[in-house]
Amino acid sequence: MGEAGMGEAGMRGPGLSGPLLEARNLSIRFGGLVAVSRVDFSLAAGEVLCVIGPNGAGKSTLFNLISGLYRPSSGTVRLAGRDITGWPAHRIAAAGIARTFQSSRLFADLTLIDNVVIGMHCRTRTGVFDALLRPARARAELEAAAARAGDLLRLVSPDLHDRRHSLAGALPQADRRRLEIARALASEPKVILLDEPSSGMDDRDTDALIEDIRLTMTERPGLSYIIIEHDMRLVAALPERVMVIDYGEKIAEGPFAEVRLMPRVQEAYLGRKATHA
Ligand code: ADP
Ligand code: MG
């Protein structure tokens, strides 16, 4: 990684003496292919890190490693100093890492509210048996969850809040993406991983998305983001720091204005798809 280990803002949380999230020497191999190769990075509380790189570079795989969908072949992931390497995805989610996927994973025939409530499941206390044995408590908890889901929708987008009782399947693509962000926030994460949030959006939708993300950053100042993005307008507009992945390796890191001028970064893009650069 570019900087020394101690992130400035990483000193915030109680008893925390290092970055909020840290990957060291992270690799995964699929047969002969090393999809992520010895990647190091760290993320401070409240920081936004953008991940860019050509198609197939290993960006989504990196998310799968951090969120526990894949187990790394080597390397470690630490959250608030705790080694979470190899933990199952549900445990990592409960520990505070939420994500969205490159292709939408909403429940199309549930309402917006219910989609967000599902995102809270690792934070609600009532399990199936409780619900059967203590229905009043279960109902009260569900009602509280629905109210909180409404608040989250309003936070991400007042416009989505107005349509909270519609079915998610009826939403245009851009609004589905925003709904996914609201759902990810519902688990009260410390870190949120967004995989190409602007995919399928036109420029106007992307501008609105940038505003949505800025709003959540103001409302939740301690929340950290890692955003995989192909739209360079969004990359230029949001984060303080960019990390470039090519063939599974981190080839550059720093402010976007500097990183984009690096010959190695330009080659990575021009070598394959000039439209990306
Ligand atoms: P990106 O998100 O940067 O476009 P990915 O992380 O999706 O790229 O993929 C990186 C490489 O890893 C690709 O060559 C992809 O085919 C490969 N890959 C990803 N997941 C798997 C898997 N489960 N099994 C085999 N190969 C995979
Ligand atoms: Mg991807």
Image (tube, rainbow, N blue to C red):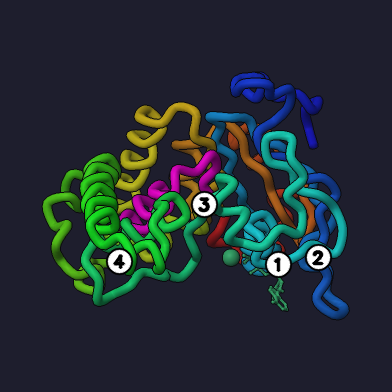
Secondary structure at numbered mark 3:
strand
In space, the residues marked 4 and 3 are separated at their CA atoms by 20 Å
Query: Which span of residues is magenta-colored?
Result: 177-193
Residue that mark 3 sits on: 98
Nearer the camera: disc 4 or disc 3: 3
**What x and y, as percent, mark residue 45?**
58, 29
Image quarter of residue 263? top right
Q: Is mark 1 within 8 Å of ligand 1?
A: yes
Nearer the camera: disc 2 or disc 1: 1
In space, the residues marked 2 and 3 are separated at their CA atoms by 21 Å
Earlier along the polypeptide chain: callout 2 or callout 1? 2
**What x and y, as percent, mark residue 170?**
19, 72
For disc 1, the neighbor class at 10 Å (few under 14, some 14 to 19, many from 20) is some
Amino acid type, label 2: Ile
State if disc 3 and disc 2 touch (CB < 8 Å): no
For disc 4, the neighbor class at 10 Å (few under 14, some 14 to 19, many from 20) is some
Nearer the camera: disc 2 or disc 3: 3
Residue that mark 1 sits on: 70
Secondary structure at numbered mark 4:
helix
In space, the residues marked 2 and 4 are separated at their CA atoms by 32 Å
Residue 262 sits above or below residue 165 on the image: above
Residue that mark 4 sits on: 173
State if disc 1 and disc 2 touch (CB < 8 Å): yes
**What x and y, as percent, mark residue 54?**
64, 62
Residue 152 falls inside the magenta stretch = no
Residue that mark 2 sits on: 28
Nearer the camera: disc 4 or disc 1: 1
Residue depicted at 49% across the width and 34% down the height:
223
In space, the residues marked 1 and 3 are separated at their CA atoms by 15 Å
Q: Is mark 4 within 8 Å of ligand 2?
A: no
